[in-house]
Image (cartoon, helix red, strand yellow):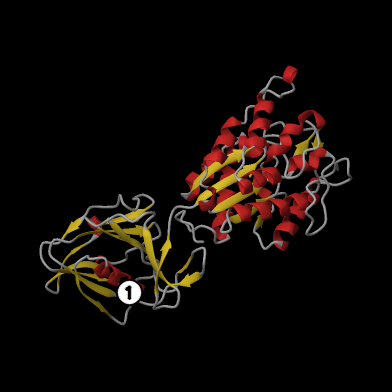
């Protein structure tokens, strides 16, 4: 089954090489590809309204999948025609994504005689795919797009893959999974509780440094998991053997199992342990010093980009919290370096913006502050079930508003 994608005129689609705006009558041009692929398209006509009539041969079987935002105001705008006469609406051959997945759409429409489809483009409608039964399935669903409005190019349109890096807020929460469900993306949780963005200097827990963000990025850049394996094995040991009874095997194996060069988005949600460490400083703009939050960020960005040049990196700052066992208000209690938690949040935002990367500043988020006991556990740090759901929606909406995924969970880069 070949899947041909189309969109309304003026819709944008981005791939790893360029940004593309669909030309007018792109459905007309896209359907030409059906003919080039050997599907029996007898004729194509276009009208001034932006509609297209496609004549299919007897026996061709097709199905249409529309985005969930599709709104058909008049059934007559989408009709099957036989010998120039309308015979039926195509509602039974239309599915809406994600309720109906591409490849698993509505009923097939079987032509009983030479038939034309009259498709008029209306505001708010978005044709996601035309499927032709009996043709070969192309990997990842091939989308035909344009660089200059005339030269046909191939691009991949697929469900976005997101990797969620972070500390215990990520590891022990469910926000990655819930965000994936909310946005229609595939999201992986690789949170390592107690870890930092920067260099972990605790002598008794030196193995945790391999689980810090800047070191995880190094592991992905080199593809060598030996040091991380050793660190995870040591952390898993009982305290009497120098460990911490902390099993991070699952996150490590998730990270190892990723096809990282094909990951679309990395969400980096660290900083709260950097603040409470009392030794990781803020750092200077452009720093590469792993003992500072800005330096560790720059090392992480550099290494992730080497591992996957096309990856989109998004930073999320810590939320408002209490610390020292839920007893100290982060607004009024600085750490041992004299910095407040908001200083770390601001530093993350500053360095993300300096690198041209999106950053969601969560510290002053009114949802968390106004519903603190609902969204945050009594320890003052970790999200409740309601808090995890709130994070999932807030971060998911930010990815959409930043233009990294569309409302159907498709990668747009």
For disc 1, the neighbor class at 10 Å (few under 14, some 14 to 19, many from 20) is many
Q: Is residue 376 visible?
A: no
Q: From the image, tell me which residue sits under label 1.
A: 29
The image quadrant that residue 320 belongs to is: top right
Residue in the image at 62% along x and 41% along y: 224
Task: Give how far across and how far down residue 89 sits, in percent.
Answer: 21, 63
For the residue pair 28 and 301, the one nearer the viewer reads as 301
Above/below status of 272 relative to 57? above
State the count of labels: 1
Residue in the image at 46% along x and 56% along y: 410
> Residue at the bottom extreme?
48
Element type where label 1 sits in the image = helix
The image quadrant that residue 273 belongs to is: top right
Task: Give how far across and how far down residue 196 sits, in percent.
Answer: 73, 41
- Looking at the image, residue 67 sits to the left or right of residue 209; the answer is left
Quadrant holding the N terminus: bottom left
Above/below status of 336 relative to 366? above
Residue in the image at 24% along x and 69% along y: 35
For the residue pair 268 and 200, the one nearer the viewer reads as 200
Residue in the image at 51% along x and 61% along y: 413
Task: Give how far across and how far down residue 12 sits, in percent.
Answer: 47, 69
For the residue pair 324 and 278, the one nearer the viewer reads as 278
Q: Is residue 271 visible?
A: yes
Above/below status of 380 relative to 26? above
- Looking at the image, residue 377 sits to the left or right of residue 394; the answer is right
Task: Give how far across and how far down residue 137 sits, in percent.
Answer: 30, 54
- Looking at the image, residue 89 sits to the left or right of residue 364; the answer is left
Above/below status of 112 relative to 288? below
């Amino acid at each position: 089954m070949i899947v041909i994608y189309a969109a309304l005129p003026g819709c944008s689609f981005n791939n790893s090489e360029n940004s593309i705006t669909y030309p007018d009558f792109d459905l007309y041009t896209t359907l030409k590809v059906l003919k080039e692929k050997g599907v029996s398209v007898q004729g194509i006509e276009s009208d001034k309204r932006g509609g297209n009539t496609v004549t299919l041969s007897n026996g061709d079987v097709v199905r249409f999948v529309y985005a969930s935002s599709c709104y058909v105001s008049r059934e007559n705008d989408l009709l099957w025609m036989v010998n120039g006469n309308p015979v039926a609406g195509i509602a039974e051959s239309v599915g809406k994504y994600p309720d109906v997945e591409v490849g698993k759409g509505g009923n097939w429409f079987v032509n009983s005689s030479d038939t034309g489809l009259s498709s008029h483009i209306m505001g708010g409608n978005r044709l996601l795919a035309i499927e032709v039964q009996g043709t070969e399935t192309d990997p990842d669903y091939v989308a035909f797009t344009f660089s200059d409005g005339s030269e046909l190019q191939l691009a991949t349109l697929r469900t976005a893959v997101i990797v969620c890096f972070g500390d215990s807020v990520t590891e022990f929460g469910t926000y990655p999974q819930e965000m994936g469900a909310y946005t229609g993306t595939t999201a992986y949780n690789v949170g390592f509780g107690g870890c930092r963005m920067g260099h972990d200097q605790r002598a008794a827990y030196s193995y945790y440094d391999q689980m810090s963000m800047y070191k995880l990025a190094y592991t992905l850049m080199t593809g060598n998991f030996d040091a991380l394996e050793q660190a995870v094995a040591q952390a898993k040991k009982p305290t009497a053997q120098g460990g911490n009874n902390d099993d991070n095997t699952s996150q490590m194996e998730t990270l190892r199992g990723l096809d990282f060069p094909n990951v679309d988005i990395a969400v980096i949600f660290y900083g709260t342990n950097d603040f409470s460490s009392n030794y990781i400083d803020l750092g200077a703009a452009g720093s590469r010093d792993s003992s500072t939050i800005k330096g560790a960020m720059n090392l992480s960005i550099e290494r992730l980009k080497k591992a996957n040049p096309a990856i989109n990196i998004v930073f999320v700052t810590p939320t408002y919290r209490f610390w020292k066992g839920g007893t100290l208000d982060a607004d009024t209690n600085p750490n041992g370096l004299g910095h407040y938690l908001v200083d770390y949040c601001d530093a993350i935002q500053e360095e993300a913006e300096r690198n041209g990367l999106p950053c969601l500043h969560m510290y002053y988020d009114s949802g968390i502050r106004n519903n603190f006991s609902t969204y945050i556990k009594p320890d003052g740090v970790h999200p409740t079930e309601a808090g995890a759901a709130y994070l999932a929606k807030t971060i998911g909406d930010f990815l959409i508003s930043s233009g990294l995924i569309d409302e159907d969970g498709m990668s747009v880069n």
